[in-house]
Image (cartoon, coloured by chain):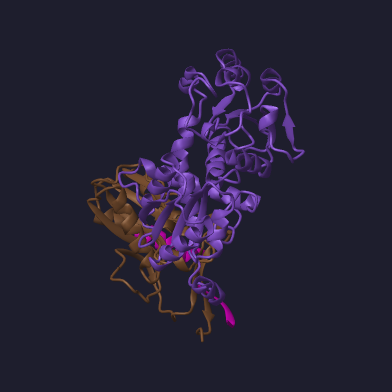
Chain colours: A purple, B brown
Amino acid sequence: MSTTAPPARRKDLLDIESLTREEIVFLLDTARPFKDLFDRSVKKVPALRGKTVLNLFFEPSTRTRASFEIAAKRLSADVTNLAITQSSVTKGESILDTVDTMQSMKVDYMVVRHAAAGVPAFIARHTPAAVINAGDGNHAHPTQALLDAFTMREAVGELDGRRILLVGDLLHSRVFRSVSTVARKLDMDVGIFAPTTLIPSGRPDYMQAFSTFDEALEWSPDFVYLLRLQRERQAAHFFPSLREYHHVFGLTRERFLECRRRGIRIMHPGPVNRGVELVDEVLTYEHCLINRQVENGIAARMAVLYWLQPAVTPLPDEKEEFAS
Amino acid sequence: MSETGETSLLAAPDIRHKIERIAAQIVEAHPDRPLALVGIHTRGAVLCRRVYDILRARGRDTAFGTLDIALYRDDLDNLGTIPSIRGSDLPFPVEGAHIILFDDVLFTGRTIRAALDELVDYGRPARIELAVLVDRGHRELPIAPDYLGQSMSTARHDHVRVCFTETDGREGVFLTRSAPQP
């Protein structure tokens, strides 16, 4: 139970970077009682009754979209899913047109996923609806980071001074950006281990880089977070083969046994590429948190929907912008 | 808003007396039935706990739970700061239970409405009754207490505050008169 006053509500959740530690802790504290609701006979509460949540997905997603849909429904909101594949229309026009149309339908919350970084922020500036970034390019995936922080807290308690090792494709990963940021804001130590070709330039100093997996495990992380190898995002060749990747950067059987010996918790944002990021037996390991992450995603997203507050009416200058 | 100071309505001995009377009335109304006492966060839970302790001391088969009605409020839209959620704790089957709901002050009745909605989401109780320490009037819903400590006539804009040692470090019921909002 938090003793401090709740932070003021925001209209949008676009990234972790702009959240304060207090806001993050409030959302994590709030997610806890939401999770308790799942054991009730009626899993819904009426907090968002009469509100409409639009899932606006410009990029395919099943898990995240379903998670947002269940979260919204458990808050008694009405949910509409809109999956938009890229059309021949130029991006800028099509997005604004879409938002304009949605605005006429008076939606209260928009959950936005797009392959281009910055689109949710762009939409947020043009709608009174509360906008939640559900993943934009390689920029941010804030609700993933919140559910991961919630899962870590659930596993070990307070996170200050705990260590998280992020492994894999850092370059293409919005999950990496959001999770490392949330870890930093919660005063965790962040380690990384990745192919040099998949480490973003401009990596902050607080991250400790390792050159081998063994060296990284010697650092004694509390959590090993395996990032998904984003095969669909890799036009260029960043490493020789999947087998090679698994051999060097994957959680092989030997490394898994070492993790188990040390009681290290294993995390992955899903979906898992079996035999690439990790071997199958990890999934039945007692400290494998992957399924817990999925379950907690609903509670974390409920907390976000509960906290955000749509603007009452569009500002006059925004209305003009729509007309132009 | 101009305030003209705080008037004491009930002192510590009065509160103790009222709570003992509520407990006695509950025992009288339910001589042998198992009861579930449920207090609304925060001070309703304190009131509930005290009555629970009295009933337990008399050897009554009684359960104790707390209810956080934040998610059932009908005014969430308008709140610039969202309430913290502490969660509800009902460690007994609500289905078929005889529940007595506790709150410190009964005012518009909206809190009780929210609590009733939440309770029935846990199951179908056989019966729900209501116990409050203070009824200050100005109801906006058809809700009345079954067990009442004290009824008071107040103006709509007054503030009635119940303070318990457990939550406020002092004991008493206080009235603060405020000028009507323009």
Residue found at the very far top of the displayed protein:
A254
Residue found at the very far right of the displayed protein:
A205
Above or below — where is A67 with respect to B69? Answer: above
Above or below — where is A315 with respect to B115? Answer: below
Quadrant of the rendering where the N terminus of chain B is positioned: bottom right
- Confirm whether residue B66 shows in the render: yes
Above or below — where is B115 with respect to A184? Answer: below
The image quarter in which residue B140 lies: bottom left
Magenta stretch containing residue B99, yes or no?
no
Which x, y percent locates residue A201? 73, 38
Q: Which segment is the magenta one? A: B1-24
The image quarter in which residue A208 lies: top right
Q: Nearer the viewer, residue A274 or B131?
A: A274
Residue sitting at 37 percent across and 77 percent down? B138
Magenta stretch containing residue B3, yes or no?
yes
Above or below — where is B13 with respect to A72? Answer: below
Residue found at the very far front of the displayed protein:
A88
The mark total stands at: 0
Relative horizontal placement of residue B32, taking residue A298 as reference (left or right):
left
The image quarter in which residue A190 lies: top right
Which x, y percent locates residue B13? 48, 63
Relative horizontal placement of residue B29, taking residue B72 as reference (left or right):
left
Which x, y percent locates residue A272? 48, 28
Which x, y percent locates residue A163? 67, 31
Residue found at the very far bottom of the displayed protein:
B182
Q: Nearer the viewer, residue A154 or A75?
A: A75
